[in-house]
Amino acid sequence: MTACYLDHNATTPLGMPAREAMARAIEVTGNPSSVHAFGRDARKIVEDARASVAELAGIAPANVIFTSGGSEANNTILRGVAADTIITSAVEHASLLDAVPDALRIPVDADGVVRLDALALALEGAEGRTLVSVMAANNETGVVQPIAEVSALCKDAGALLHVDAIQWAAKRPLFEITAYADAVSLSAHKFQGPAGTGAILIKDGVAFEPLVRGGGQERRRRAGTENVVGIAGFGAAAAAALQALPEYARIGALRDRIETELSDGARFYGQDADRLANTTCIAMPGVSAETQVMAFDLAGVAVSAGSACSSGKVEPSHVLLAMGLSKDEAAQAIRVSLGPDTTEEDVDRFIAAWRDLYRRTSRAGEAA
């Protein structure tokens, strides 16, 4: 039985363009910082990929800084920008929240959308140089944040804006984020590139202290020999992503079918907000997320309980708690995230598995 993969927000299958680019790059010998022909060959791979990522983002290649992934990108900006006050939303990724545990947290509404009134008040009371960080779209619910409005508030207050666009990239046009943000974080493996490769997209004039030091790579903004093979895959995935954006209309229709067909028994969180087309956060009342994930796995369907970066934790999702759910409610929610390879048959299989588990647990509850 072929497994059905519905956990694309955790990581996506490596796409063929990235595979082919990485296979070519692995044959190249040379450090991109070396001046001889071998080094120049490696440097060309890095700079070609930088140009592809820049094109996806609608920015200049010089404003792309390669990192080891999205978590490093988030940490670099949040810890590296000189700021007296740091403000984030309450539903950010753990790599951001843990990077600045003493930051001021802005609440969200019941759909998970940042409260602009609370942000305005926080900015009004902020002292010194201020950095605001609000994600473009949530990794657990897919809920989209009003980045244009957040940016306007930041500009009025003279604050810098960082946006974690790791889930957004390749699902919606990235220039819609880079047009407003001073710094943006990306991760290649969220859109069919390799894991272990990410980027910071930085506006001219935005300074920060490097998180990784000890070399002049990436224009002295991130030390360490560049991951040439991973970066090659990143560039190819970025180029392919530009062509794949229209595919999310089909993916959105599949997500909507899941929600329509399971509307009798399931609860959906963030459903009334603007969301990424591929993501739904579903609760099965009375059944823990851990039980659901295991049951779906046995049925050959891969889903997750919240963020994959929080695997092993037993606490309910901080995202759902911030949206006003009780601990019990939050502990019953799973995330289903579709991708370009998701088919109608995959959705059929998930729906059948969900209904089967719901019937079995409902009967067990009645018997008890």
Image (cartoon, helix red, strand yellow):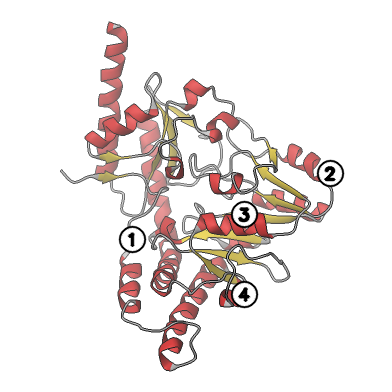
Asked which secondary structure carries label 2, the reply is: helix
Residue under label 4, please give it: 220
Q: Nearer the viewer, residue 149 or 101?
A: 101
Task: Look at the picture and state if 120 lies above or below 245.
Answer: above
Spatial separation of the CA atoms under disc 3 and disc 1: 25 Å
Question: Could you say where residue 295 lies in the image, as x and y percent from the top left?
Answer: 27, 30
Spatial separation of the CA atoms under disc 4 and disc 1: 30 Å
Residue at x-position 59% and y-position 68% = 213
Q: Nearer the viewer, residue 62 or 358?
A: 62
Residue 3: image quadrant is: top left
Question: Could you say where residue 109 lies in the image, as x and y percent from the top left?
Answer: 64, 32
Mark yes or no: residue 62 visible: no
On screen, residue 195 versus residue 83, left or right, reads left
Task: Look at the picture and state if 319 lies above or below 365.
Answer: below
Residue under label 1, please give it: 14
Residue under label 3, please give it: 163
Question: Reading the chain from its start, which is encountered first: label 3 or label 4?
Answer: 3
Dot 2 crowding, Cα within 10 Å, few <14, some 14–19, many 20+:
few
Question: Reading the chain from its start, which is encountered first: label 2 or label 4?
Answer: 2
Instruction: Kindly indicate whether the residue at mark 4 contacts the one at mark 2 (C-beta within 8 angstroms).
Output: no
